[in-house]
């Protein structure tokens, strides 16, 4: 019996190519963050460049360059204001912890006692070691971010030449394999890019609504919180909930329980808006997935891929359903 005979079938051959791609991803898993960031940046930059080129009639390289100049400018502002916001949060928490007005009565007394016991049990050397480890991780993230921006810029600028060169693989003796390889990878990138664009739109709307609430409550460091809310908004559904942590801490510091309650109500309303209007409205034409399926998918993917699972979890599930022709992606 010939073991390669099933591969003569087009469907099984495509499964074989998908298996090769999965093995390749496992082999290159250490570079996944860099590859995903480069892919997302390239997709968004080329799409934005096309829109600029359409309206301004300028050349393609110049439109791409404008996109990256604007994005790098936004990134510098985000890092500057984000750092100031984090420093403000830490200083405010230290100040709050040293005050005696809030931890002498009620449930806070028990919480404060447990925190004090934990503080006395801390090992200074271990704390310093963990601090350096966290700084090293932040440095690694920034390194990957800068490298992915550079790679995506080069890719976007030289895309026509790269596309022409890649066609040599399609015309090679192994054209069947590389043809299927291209179809699968291209389909996943399209799904990832389209869903990420939709999540960007949802995150932008959520950010505008939340910033109006923060301005009404006279929150400090509005720009820093705007950037934080927007970045967390890129995580489908749960991003809004995660933003509760810094917002409630700051609300308690600058105000009282009334301020905290207003923040909780605002986040709950925004979560309701995203879950029952924005997500179904914008995603319905793309995924047709119930909210429960999306939430379960995010939980499972986070366990498998970590933080990246929250961002690419939905595109992976959408791609699987599309690949096996269970549910067609209408992108």
Image: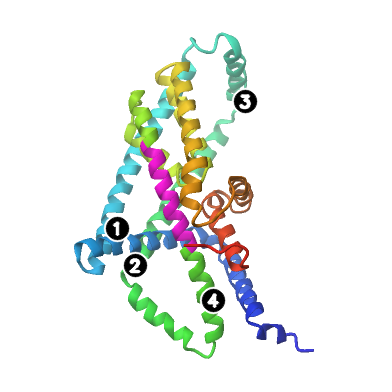
Q: Secondary structure at mark 4?
A: helix
Q: In the displayed structure, does residue 49 sit left or right of residue 106?
A: left
Q: Secondary structure at mark 3?
A: helix
Tell me what residue is drawn at x 49 percent, y 56 percent: 285
Q: Which residue is mark 4?
A: 181
Report crowding for label 3: few under 14, some 14 to 19, many 20 or more residues within 10 A (C-alpha): few
Q: Sequence-wise, which precedes: disc 1 or disc 4? A: 1
Does residue 95 appear anywhere in the picture?
no
Rounded to the nearest angstrom, the CA distance separating label 3 from label 1 is 48 Å
Q: Indicate the position of residue 193 as horizontal and vertical percent values.
A: 44, 60
Q: Sequence-wise, which precedes: disc 4 or disc 2? A: 2
Q: Which residue is mark 3?
A: 121
The residue lying toward the viewer, choosing from 287 and 75, is: 287
Above/below status of 292 relative to 190: above
Q: Secondary structure at mark 1?
A: helix
Q: Are marks 3 and 2 in contact (CB under 8 Å)?
A: no
Q: Is residue 224 magenta?
A: no
- Which region is colored magenta? 191-208
Q: Sequence-wise, which precedes: disc 3 or disc 4? A: 3
Q: Which residue is mark 2?
A: 156
Magenta-colored segment: predominant secondary structure: helix
Which of label 3 and label 2 is nearer to you? 2
Residue that protrudes farthest toward the bottom in the picture: 173
Report crowding for label 4: few under 14, some 14 to 19, many 20 or more residues within 10 A (C-alpha): some
Q: Are marks 3 and 4 in contact (CB under 8 Å)?
A: no
Which of label 3 and label 1 is nearer to you? 1
Q: Which residue is mark 1?
A: 68
């Amino acid at each position: 019996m010939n073991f390669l005979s099933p591969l003569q079938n087009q469907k099984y051959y495509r499964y074989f190519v998908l298996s090769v791609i999965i093995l390749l991803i496992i082999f290159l898993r250490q570079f996944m963050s860099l590859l995903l960031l480069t892919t997302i940046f390239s997709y968004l930059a080329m799409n934005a460049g096309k829109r600029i080129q359409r309206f301004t009639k300028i050349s393609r390289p110049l439109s791409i360059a404008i996109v990256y100049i604007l994005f790098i400018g936004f990134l510098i502002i985000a890092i500057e204001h984000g750092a100031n916001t984090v420093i403000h949060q830490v200083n405010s928490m230290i100040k709050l912890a040293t005050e005696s007005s809030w931890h002498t009565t009620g449930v806070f007394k028990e919480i404060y006692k447990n925190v004090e016991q934990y503080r006395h049990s801390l090992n200074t050397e271990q704390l310093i070691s963990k601090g350096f480890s966290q700084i090293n991780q932040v440095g690694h993230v920034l390194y990957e971010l800068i490298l992915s921006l550079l790679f995506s810029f080069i890719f976007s600028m030289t895309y026509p030449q790269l596309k022409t060169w890649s066609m040599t693989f399609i015309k090679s003796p192994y054209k069947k394999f590389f043809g299927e390889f291209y179809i699968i990878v291209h389909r996943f990138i399209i799904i990832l890019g389209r869903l990420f664009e939709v999540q960007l739109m949802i995150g932008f709307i959520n950010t505008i609504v939340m910033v109006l609430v923060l301005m009404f409550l006279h929150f400090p460091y509005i720009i820093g919180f705007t950037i934080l809310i927007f970045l967390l908004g890129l995580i489908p559904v749960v991003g809004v909930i995660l933003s509760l942590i810094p917002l409630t801490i700051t609300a308690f510091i600058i105000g009282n329980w009334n301020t905290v309650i207003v923040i909780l109500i605002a986040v709950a309303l925004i979560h309701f808006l995203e879950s029952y209007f924005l997500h179904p409205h914008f995603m319905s034409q793309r995924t047709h997935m119930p909210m429960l399926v999306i939430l379960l998918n995010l939980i499972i993917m986070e366990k498998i891929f970590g933080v990246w699972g929250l961002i690419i979890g939905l595109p992976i599930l959408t791609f699987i359903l599309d690949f096996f022709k269970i549910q067609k992606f209408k992108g």
